[in-house]
Amino acid sequence: MLRPEELGEGERERWRELRSAAEAPRSPFMEPEFTTAVGRVRPGARVAVLYEGAEPSGFLPHERGVLGQGRAIGLGVSDCQGAILRPGLVPEAGALLRACSVSSLAFDNLEAGQDLFLPYAAEEHATHVIDVEKGYETYESVLRAQSPKFLKTTLAKERRLGRRAGPVRFVFDERDPAALRALMEWKSAQYRRTGRRDRFAQEWISRLVGRLAETRAPQCTGTLSVLYAGGRPVAAHFGLRSASVLACWFPAYDPQFAKYSPGLVLHLRMAEAAAAEGIGMLDMGRGAAEYKDALKTGELAVHEGALTRPGAGAALHWLSREPARRAHGFVRARPRLASLASRTLKGAARLRRS
């Protein structure tokens, strides 16, 4: 049992080898660099290293919480979770939890194919993806076929933005710290405007983003993409990329330019740049959103639930999480109720601002 920063280079290389052998898309959230960054801002971060003889055969990044409750590494912000195991290796769940000194291990974005965790999944969700494996031109042709009005309107708005605000310029990998600060301010304002918890008000998340913005590794690189108009940023996105996947994480735009749909324009340019870099997929994450439905070419399954072992700790986990999870699921499954809940959140946010 190690803290992430205690992993040796040999162990990290073995982690990468095991990950490259997996059939799942190579999400940067499943790389040792992401776990190490979380470990720098979350003191409960640990990695269980499984050995067969002298060679590591698996890694389980996780966080130890109070009263023996565990959670996937970066739970709440990580869009892909699970263990990194030798193909065919499925440890005994209870023994693994005991070794980690936890009674439960919660996950909310478990990737498909995680046989260790899947028996404990309570819900399946769809994560929305953009396939650019065959190039951006092929992706545009898919958009024209499935939603011709959407693509035509978005490109027209991009041209209108250029006429009204100045020349439009896109930077796929921007290094200017001011642009990252602008993105975080827009995102915080969006959270408050929609009545949702401001993630950037949590110090550990802000620090994590700052660390990952400086991370440059072949399979985990912090990437800030910015759309400029007339020399000023109007939309931005911060995410992580591997050699084959761009994990879309924190997109936001300047509300002053909302009528030009700069967020949609930004995503089209990100898809174009990703394809040019040889990246085959953009993962926009789970959660319903109109822009995701407009941009996606398909969906992948992720799972929510908790690995548990019998005892008081498992009961505590159930009481602390299960009622809220079931309530959220009940609302999500009923579009009219979900719409009412969204309007209620926005109304409450307006009242707090007034």
Image (cartoon, rainbow, N blue to C red):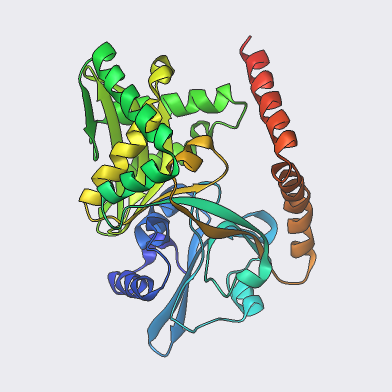
Horizontal and vertical percent for residue 243? 27, 59
Q: Residue furthest bottom?
A: 53
Residue 63 visible at all: no
Left or right of 290 in this view: 310: right
- The quadrant of the picture occupied by the C terminus is top right
Left or right of 161: which side holds 352? right
Tell how many labels: 0
Residue drawn where x is 43% and y is 42% of the image: 295
Does any portion of residue 241 appear in the rendered image?
yes
Of residues 51 and 114, the one drawn nearer to the viewer in this rendering: 114
- Please state the horizontal and vertical placement of residue 224, each as a whole percent of the image: 30, 38
Q: Quadrant of residue 261?
A: top left
Is 241 in front, or is 264? 264
Of all residues shown, which one is farthest toward the top?
354
The residue sitting at 24% across, 44% down in the picture is: 273
Examine the rendered structure and indicate whether residue 39 appears above or below residue 324.
Answer: below
Q: From what the image shows, is residue 9 above or below residue 344?
A: below
Residue 15 picture quarter: bottom left
| Residue toward you, 2 or 123 | 123
At a point 76% along the width and 72% down the height, the residue shown is 310
How far across and down, in percent of the image, does residue 18 sit? 37, 75
> In the shown orientation, is residue 338 left or right of residue 230?
right
Q: Residue 66 in the image: x percent, y percent?
A: 66, 54
Q: Is residue 272 above or below residue 11?
A: above
Q: Quadrant of residue 27?
A: bottom left
